[in-house]
Amino acid sequence: MSGSPSVAAFFTQRVIVGVAEYVVSREPSSTLSTYALGSCIGLAAYDPKTHCGGLLHYMLPDSTVSPDKAARQPAMFADTGIPVLFSALKGLGATRTNLRVFVAGGASVLSGPNNFKIGERNIAAAKQLLGVYGFKISGVEIGGLVNRTLHLDLSTGKLLMKLPDSERIFNLG
């Protein structure tokens, strides 16, 4: 029947990645999802050879503002979360040369002057750290004024990004 869900769709497991969290997996029936990226950054990485992927949702660019918090919750910060994400992916067999990385978020969602410019600083931290670690960015959807939601399908490497008024699909596989 046209429009009916496939059998595999009934067995898909959605894994929610909360604020200041990361998840890695190579379970093909999993979709990693993070919601409402405003000034935060969502960093999705996928290795099409090993079919493993990960998703990081970090809040702040620099852990020096709270080293104790960074030790307990490294995914809160770009400078501690990004290395932890890639180390965990390496543990699943991903390689630097195969990983495809997508960066989303960093919006300015507060009305009025934003003296802290967290979104801009989060974007700069992602670009700088990915460059330091030698990762090529395969795609970006950053800045602006709207929040974004990401869904990474580990069976295909497809990344669905939802915005308030539209959806876009990016292929990391």
Image (cartoon, rainbow, N blue to C red):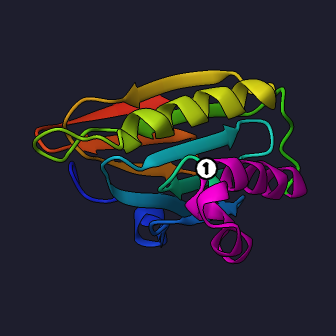
Residue at image position (29%, 40%) is: 115
**Range drawn in magenta:** 64-91
Q: Secondary structure at mark 1?
A: loop
Q: Position of residue 101 (x, y in %)?
A: 62, 33
Q: Quadrant of residue 173?
A: top right
**62 or 24, which is in the foreground?**
62
Quarter in which the N terminus is drawn: bottom left
Q: Is residue 65 magenta?
A: yes
| Within-10-Å neighbours for mark 1: few <14, some 14–19, many 20+ | some
The three-letter code of the residue at mark 1 reads Asp
Residue 57's x, y, as percent?
50, 56
Q: Is residue 62 left or right of residue 58?
A: right
Magenta span main SS: helix
Say if 136 sits above or below 100 in the image.
above
Residue under the image location 56 percent in, 63 percent down: 30
The residue drawn where x is 10% and y is 39% is 165
At 81% from the left and 32% from the top, the residue drawn is: 133
Residue 167 in which image quadrant: top left
Residue 105 in picture, x, y percent from top left: 38, 40
Percent position of residue 130, x then y: 70, 31
Q: Is residue 135 left or right of residue 46?
A: right
